[in-house]
Image (cartoon, helix red, strand yellow):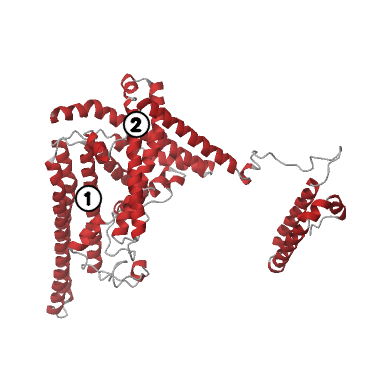
Amino acid sequence: MGQPSPAQRSSNGDSYKQGGGRPRRKQVQKVEDRDGTSYSSQSEGLKEGVEQEELGEQERQKASARRHEPMSGSSPVHVVARPSYLSSERMWYEKHTGLVNLMAVIVVATNFRLALENAFKYGLRIQTPLRALNSLTIGNPNIPLALCYPCMLLIALSALFFEQCGAWSLKSDAQLKAAISKKIDGSRASYQQLTHKLSSRVSRFEWVLFVANLVNTSAAVVVPWAVIHYTQAEPLPGGVLIAVSIVLWMKLVSYHHCCADLRAARRNGQVRPGEEGFSGDSSLTNQKSSQRLLRYPENVTVSNLIYFLALPTLCYQINYPRSPTIRKRWLARRVAELVLMLTLLSLLLQQYMIPAISNSMSPMRTMDWPRLCERVLKLALPNIYCWLVSFYCLFHLWLNIVAEVLHFGDREFYKDWWNAATVGEYWKLWNMPVHKWLLRHVYFPTLRLGLPRWASIILVFFVSAVFHELVLGVPLHLVRMWAFLGIMLQVPLVLITEHIHKRLKRDEAGNIVFWLTFCVVGQPLSVLLYYHDYLYEVHPYLKGSSS
């Protein structure tokens, strides 16, 4: 197929003798052999495609031969109808590596110029980590705030006590049911009456246990909130405390919900997936592990609860996939990365974020909208950097370090949220521990209760909005419902981006909308709003109280 003609060989003599022709004949022969095999094994429709490929190969060979021919004054230079490289018919099928490299060079040069401009304007604002932490606080020691941590440990132990009561109730109910079946001889009506009374007793006990768990888990959030409010705690220690208390609340809710489901299954004579003795297909029961799998109520112990509280997950289950060993070198590299990234985050905050936010207060107070828009856009770039570094530190480094130390096998703490085509995809991908918790303990339970799907989705965003308002509003003493409204407004934004994605049928459009709404407009504006009110309303009051 496609051999050069004798005339072409003679006109291209030198290049052909130097290796331009002979290797090409070998390559063509390989293609003929490969295509010949496909002819014998594929259908007639595939033969047409191979023939078209052969014709294309012949045209390419002819064009290559023509390029080596000497051109005369009448040699045609336009022989094929071809679109331009950047036309819509061609650009998506060509390589654009050079343009990508150019964009990378522009980004690096622009950021380097901004770094120089910032250094000339503000100087080097680098502080040691301890001094940076001290600058974020007023310096007033808060002993009640520190006592909240042992208090939360007592709340966790109280949760274990309540679940031990539930396990004891399950055991006593089984013994009582066995005694009833032995005493009653053939009286089916009497047996049904007694079992009905037993089920009523079980239902009442479960409701009492539910109320006790509700009060106990609520105390895990209410007590720290009250201490932060009445002691006028600084934002940093207050933020750490309220974040830990919310994590504890979510873990205890999952712990109680899982144990209640296991008790219900045991009363019905069932074994749930993931337990020892489950006969169905379960990766946990099939995996090879040196540690024996547990079965309810063997898991209701102090060691099991403490292990769950330390794990980098919010969903409780009896058994977890485990990694066999601790990779010490890998762990050391992750710890070194964490130290470096935290140093970079501190540099970004002190060198870029704080000056940009401080310079934005004047246009906010005078409502100078053009100047304020410029400030928001200027804050967007360091805000994106800080957000990405924070994400990498928390979800990739810290959670992997904890998982490695505790032999936790499931390391899917996030997915490729940066490729999200809609806002809804982003919320499903970026924070997998919270996403799985909301699915397991909010979304599917409400569906089982009979709520429609749209109502369950709104309830999921409502719970998430409450969490965001607590994390931001409580330590800043600014419960203004801004974070709550920001999360609830994600519901119409999800619908809008879904519509854009379906209408344009391209992932790039929705991804651009996501980046614009979150990182260019949404987050910088939220930072400015909270910082403005804290600086002019809360901070002077806290500073005056401490003095």
Mark 1 and mark 2 in contact? Answer it, CB < 8 Å: no
Q: Is residue 417 above or below residue 124?
A: below
For residue 84, side relative to residue 458 (left or right): right
Label 2 neighbour load within 10 Å: few <14, some 14-19, many 20+: few
Q: Quadrant of residue 197?
A: bottom left
Task: Give the image location of residue 487, x and y in percent.
Answer: 33, 39
The mark tally for this picture is 2
* Left or right relative to 92: residue 251: left
Can residue 233 be seen in this snapshot? yes
Coordinates of residue 455 in the picture (x, y in percent) = 34, 46
* Label whose residue precedes the other's in the sequence (1 or 2): 2
Q: Is residue 323 above or below residue 468?
A: below
Number of the label disc, if any, that sits on residue 249? 1
**Quarter of the image where the N terminus is located:** bottom right
- In 3D space, how far apart are the residues under numbered discs 1 and 2 (Cα atoms)? 41 Å
Label disc, if present, on residue 68 of the rendered structure: none
Residue 376 visible to an observer of this rendering: no
Q: Secondary structure at mark 1?
A: helix
Label 2 secondary element: loop
Residue situated furthest bottom in the rendering: 185
Residue kind at label 1, given as amino acid type = Trp
* Residue hosting label 2: 124
Q: Amino acid at mark 2?
A: Leu
